[in-house]
Image (spheres, rainbow, N blue to C red):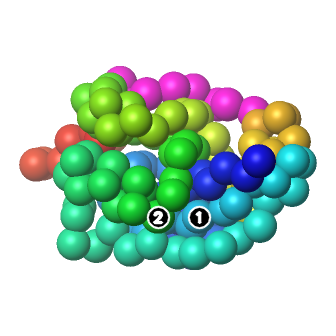
Amino acid sequence: MSKKIAIPTNGEVLDAHFGRTAAFTVFEIEGKEARKVDILSAADLETQYKGLACMFKRNGVEVLVCGGIGAGMIAGITAGGLGVVTGASGHVVDVANSYANGTLVRRGSACQEHEHHGPGQHCG
């Protein structure tokens, strides 16, 4: 049985800061294989978790694989029935293949520190 995952993307790499991502690359996971199937734009949704959760559900996504993400956004996404894996990094194809193979290395968790944000910017 296949599963779809979405990875916040900046070019061909995982966008480490979820709150700024403009696109998500969707992969279909079948066994230990990851196949790129779509790119979803989040430009009009910004960080609105309900809008993101609906977009993911409409496109059959079950799991969000990301780097930094705020705890409030995690709660909102999971309330929409999606799984969230945090702390990933690297090229999106490598991240998807690592997820498919069960070897994804997590480098941290939810975004907890706000010192790296500019004025008016927040995690999530």
Q: Quadrant of residue 46?
A: bottom left
Type of amino acid at the residue the image marks with label 2? Asn
Give 36 or 67, whichever is nearer the viewer. Answer: 36
Give 55 or 85, whichever is nearer the viewer. Answer: 55
Q: Residue at x 70, y 70 (%)?
A: 36
Element class at badge 1 = strand
Q: Quadrant of residue 92?
A: bottom right
Per the image, the residue denoted by label 2 is 59
Q: Is residue 41 magenta?
A: no
- In the picture, measured across the screen, residue 60 lies left or right of residue 57, that is right
Dot 2, crowdedness within 10 Å: few (<14), some or many (≥20)? some
Q: Position of residue 69 (x, y in %)?
A: 40, 38
Q: Position of residue 10 (x, y in %)?
A: 51, 68
- In the picture, measured across the screen, residue 70 lies left or right of residue 109, that is left
Q: Residue at x 79, y 59 (%)?
A: 34
- Indicate which label's residue lies in the foreground, 1 or 2: 2
Q: Residue at x 51, y 26 (%)?
A: 109
Type of amino acid at the residue the image marks with label 1? Val
Per the image, the residue denoted by label 1 is 26
Residue 80 visible somewhere in the drawing = yes
The stretch of residues the image draws in magenta is 105-113
Spatial distance from mark 1 to mark 2, Cα to Cα? 9 Å
